[in-house]
Amino acid sequence: MIKLPSPGRVTALALVLIIFVLPPVWLLLSALKPQAEIFQWPPSLFPEQLTFEHFSKTMSRANFGTYFLNSAIVSVSSALLSVTMSVMAGYALAKFRFPGDTVIFLIIMSAVMVPLQIVLIPVFLVLRDLGMLNTLWGLIIAPAATPTGVFLMRQYITGIPDSLIEAARIDGTPEWRILLRIIVPLSLPAIGTLLAFNLVWRWNDYLWPFLIVNQQDQWTVQLAIANSIGRFSINWPRLLSMTVLSILPMLVMFIALQKTLMNGLMSGATKE
Amino acid sequence: MSMGNQTHRTGTGSAGFSGRLKLAGKTSWPYLLLLPTVALLFAFTLYPLLQGMWMSLFRRGLVVVEQLPETTPVFVGFDNYMQLFGDKDFTVSLVRTVVFVIIAVPLQLIASLALALLLAPQNRFNAVVRTIVFFPSMISGLIIGVIWAWLFARNSGLVNYGLSLVNIPAVPWLEQDQLAQIAVVVAWIWGGAGFNMMILIAGLTAIPKDLYEAAAIDGTSRWRTFTRITLPLLEPSIVVVVVLGVIGAFQVYEIVVSLTTGGPGRATVFLVQNIYETAFRKPNQAGLAAAQSGILFVILMVLTIIQLRVARRRG
Amino acid sequence: MKVFKRSALALLAAVALAGPAMAAELQLLWYVDGDEQEQKLRGMLDEYTKLHPETTFDLQITPYDGVSEKFRQFAASGIMPDVSLTSSMEPVIRPFLVDWAQVNGPDWINQFVKGWADGAKLGDKVIAAPLDVTAVGIFYNAEAFEKAGVPLPAPGVTWDEVLPVLKQVSEKAGVRFPLVWDVSAHRYLTYQFQYGNHIYSEDAPIQVAMDDASWVTTLKHFVKITEDYMPPGLWSGSSSDKPYDMFVNQQAVAYMSGSWQIGSFNDGAEFKWQAGPTPKGTVSSSNVGGNYLVAFNTSKHLDEATSFVNWMTSPEVQAEYAKTFGLLPANKNAPAVDYSSPDAAAAVKGFQADLENSPRYAATDQAWPEMQAGVWDAVKASVTQVVAGQVTPEEAVASVRKAAEAAIAASQ
């Protein structure tokens, strides 16, 4: 919209950067300090003694790779499943009128209205009855239906002109093809955004793994992070280094996804 | 996408909240599309939720154990709900939560919208800044609280240290009632602005460029372009941000627990923390906690319906 | 009762049938304060497996904060581990716990430190095995005292005497704060104990034994200490300043915490520290705490589980456990523990003496199961809300009494 950077724009950008960059940078710098320096007073902004000890200790921990692998398997599978389901449900709610549509939409939305913390015991019993305890499958399937995702897709798909779908119908295109060939390509920005969200949500899940998994070889990164908080003390070097490491895959994913998304948008634009 | 203006054509005003023109579909197709979502939600959220609502009609422990007679449910009808009216901890935390929602949600919308407009143009630099702004959404609320608590620590935080360098005395960011409440609002907005920004950018991307080109040719002012083109066409995305913002703000919990743990005193105890403490820390009050959840549920349901209806009318 | 009879029968049957031992993998639920502890624990489990090759372990680590949620899941679902570490036996799991009075006889529990052993009793039953004991007490930065040229407090010193000394040391030695104090109900209650105040009666039947006026006076004193000697706002309930880290970074002259810190100070502190003498009020008092092991009567390997617990709580292993983790053994018959450093050994000795010299209520108060039903939270809120200026000390003490009475009512 605005082509050249104006002074106002530069100021705004600088402000945004300060507010959003400082806290994570502080986190990273602290993770690079020796334990005694982390809570030193007066605080040192930059590590006086740069150390990678916390990272190497965290990474050399026997199961570190396993936790990351588990987290990766679970979050990627669950996110893909979730986005697929959200596109399907969002499309149905945005473009079809059928008996019970409003009620179904409200029922779906009602699932975000009470926090999970409050219904943990009944959820645990359901997981037990479905045989999902202590399985990665449980971690993938249980959180895969997301009302937020359905809502997001419904709102976005609503903006796709009905005429495109009508035209395809007149041509005799099967319904599944309309979804795959018209709705999905036109929803790419929303799908990409939702995929990023889902990956982040599932990567950060703590309550689901806490409920489902007991065995240490099925731990996810978040369970490992939570275990740096002990009864009497917090293992700050571990907590900080684990947190920094746990964010890295998300950063890489986000940057990669943005790039793909931008390319997708460009190619989509030329086709239209 | 040249027919973008059609997206905001007023619907026929009949069934469905969007009120947009709906396609008469093949009968079973939309149900099939919805089946996986509804089935999973039913098993893992709605069914447990219904059980929770049922619990609110009993006086009972959180877990019923056969051998412990005191945990056996006793039907009390709506007594739990009645009791809540006189429960000061509950009413105070409810009012506090409502105030939080009224302040935090609009502020977050404005911040997210500003960020989205600033960073929507697709270029490399914006992509980097966007990643930075989205960063808080990549970490859990717990860690967000930990980071801010640390920065704002009265006697060991970086912020007060910075102030001390210019001879400003330490500010009790987290130790004074109003300041702590403001700190929660700030951390909450910081934590969620990137998420909302991405939704709004996805919405902005869908607005056809030719509309802006036409406006530019007509010599329309920038503000007018914003209010006449951008805002109306962005409305579906704004609805997402507001509806999810209200739902999320009513449930603010994780961030508070790690930022202030509800203090100073009980000055930042919001509704969900109060429910949690009632259920887990007090004996045999699971029914009372469930009744509080029930009230939270009804409030959110009503607000969501109202918001969606308003959005439809305005279309 | 039925369950206990049934489980006792099952136990007998299992013992009778055992003959040549069968392979058993015991599920252990545990929480740790860091990797080193986990490694040390695994070492001890391996040692047990070497002695009893038929028994192996499936160690399930969970955050301490998650233990009570796990217990609720166990009770609701019937899926339980064989043995768990815990600091409190919550009502929902009590029917599922092995009764040690039946397994080992009624006198077995008497070999453990009295206050903590009492907490394991439930009527005639003994539902837990004491594993380790903790005491609340003070740590001094001895180096700061040296620097200030002030002698360390002598045994029998009172709070009124010690506080000005701490302030003096902090000024002379350039240490930021005279005192830091764990923001915890358990640590604050110790201060009330030191002025003769406690919550419940020492003997059954349980009743609230609070002298409200005395509680209020003591609470006011405590709030004054937080204002005059501690980092500002530390006890507001929302402070993110960390007492432990402040002390370790030499920003505080003294630290009111407990015996569980010995191990980490011994490993990590870069200055000379000393544990105790803990100042007294009108009486001297510590506060008992610690951990238990519980075995679940739903276990398929009940005899293996009980023999493992018996091994962990036997005198010799207790000494080893205490040494490995820098803790106080729960078993009174444990041979003298050979702690690795003289500082640690002196600290342990001091804390053990503190426990012995404490009034009975320092043990009985926390041993009443009613304390778990919301009383601890009320105790902590009573201080933080006064510090934050939200309630008067009188109202705060009244709320503690109310919670204490509600807990009794709920258990009857």
Image: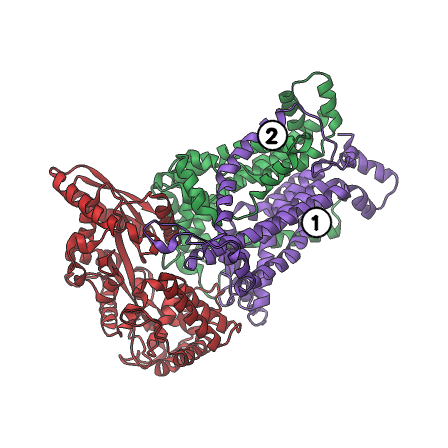
Chain colours: A green, B purple, C red
**Residue type, numbered disc 2:** Met
| SS at badge 2 | helix
From the image, tell me which residue sits under label 1.
B114
Q: Position of residue C39 (x, y in %)?
A: 28, 48
Chain on which label 2 sits: A
Residue C52: in sight, yes or no? no
| SS at badge 1 | helix
**Residue type, numbered disc 1:** Ala
**Which circle, 2 or 1, is nearer the viewer?**
2
The quarter of the rendered structure image containing the N terminus of chain A is top right
Q: Is residue A150 left or right of residue A72?
A: right
Chain on which label 1 sits: B
Q: Position of residue C45 (x, y in %)?
A: 22, 46
Q: Residue furthest right?
A: B218
Q: Are marks 2 and 1 on the same chain?
A: no
Q: Residue at x 57, y 56 (%)?
A: B187
Q: What count of labels does the image hold?
A: 2
Q: CA distance from mark 2 to mark 1?
A: 31 Å
The quarter of the rendered structure image containing the C terminus of chain A is top right
